[in-house]
C-alpha cells in the first residue's frame, strides 16, 4: 500500500503483509496493518505531525521509535499521552493529534 513500509529488513528478514484494518486519524479513515505500531501506520499514510508541545506549540513526530521519548504521544481512543511508536494498531482505533498535555474525556476520568 505504501512505499514507506519496510518489506525486507536487513536483520529481521522479510516482513509479513498482515491483515489490513481501518483506523481513524482526526476522524479521517487510514488503512493500517493490524499489529503494526500506530506511528508506523500514520507515517506510511503521510502524516508527520503527531502532537504540539504545550509551551511553544511546536510540532512533534516520530523520534526515537522505541517508547523512550514523548514526541509521538497522541490521544488514542480518548486516552491522552499514548506512545504511538509502541502501541499496536487495532481495528477501528480513534487516533487524535494531541495539543499540549492532552485532555482526559469524562468517560475515562470516571473509569
Image (spheres, helix red, strand yellow):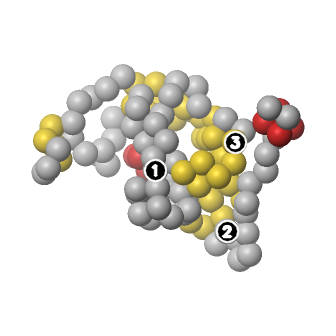
Position in image of residue 1 (x %, y %): 33, 35
Q: Secondary structure at mark 1?
A: loop
Q: Is residue 41 visible to us here?
A: no
Seen in the image, is 26 located left or right of residue 109?
Answer: left
Q: Is residue 107 above or below residue 58?
A: above
Q: Secondary structure at mark 3?
A: strand
Position in image of residue 32 (x %, y %): 44, 33
Residue placed most toward the observer, 33 or 76: 76
Q: Is residue 1 visible to us here?
A: yes
Position in image of residue 24 (x %, y %): 60, 34
The residue pinned by badge 2 equals: 53
Q: Residue at coordinates 59% horizontally, 31% vertically from top-left? A: 93
The residue pinned by badge 3 equals: 79
| Distance from Cα at disc 1 to Cα at disc 2 | 17 Å
Q: Which of the labelled discs sits on residue 85, or is there none?
A: 1
Q: Is residue 108 above or below residue 81?
A: above
| Distance from Cα at disc 3 to Cα at disc 1 | 15 Å
Q: Earlier in the sequence, mark 3 or mark 1?
A: 3
Q: Residue at coordinates 60% horizontally, 67% vertically from top-left? A: 59
Q: Residue at coordinates 65% horizontally, 52% vertically from top-left? A: 81
Say if mark 3 contacts mark 2, CB within 8 Å.
no
Q: Earlier in the sequence, mark 3 or mark 2?
A: 2
Q: Residue at coordinates 62% horizontally, 59% vertically from top-left? A: 51
Q: Splitting the image into 4 quarters, where does residue 77 fall? A: top right
Amino acid at each position: 500500500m505504501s512505499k514507506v513500509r519496510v518489506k525486507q529488513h536487513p536483520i529481521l528478514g522479510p516482513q509479513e503483509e498482515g491483515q489490513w484494518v481501518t483506523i481513524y486519524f482526526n476522524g479521517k479513515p487510514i488503512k493500517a496493518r493490524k499489529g503494526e505500531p500506530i506511528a508506523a501506520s500514520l507515517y506510511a499514510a503521510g502524516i508527520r505531525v503527531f502532537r504540539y508541545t504545550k509551551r511553544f506549540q511546536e510540532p512533534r513526530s516520530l523520534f526515537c521509535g522505541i517508547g523512550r521519548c514523548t514526541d509521538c504521544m497522541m490521544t488514542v481512543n480518548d486516552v491522552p499521552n499514548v506512545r504511538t511508536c509502541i502501541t499496536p494498531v487495532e481495528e477501528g482505533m480513534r487516533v487524535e493529534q494531541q495539543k499540549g498535555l492532552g485532555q482526559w474525556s469524562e468517560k475515562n476520568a470516571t473509569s
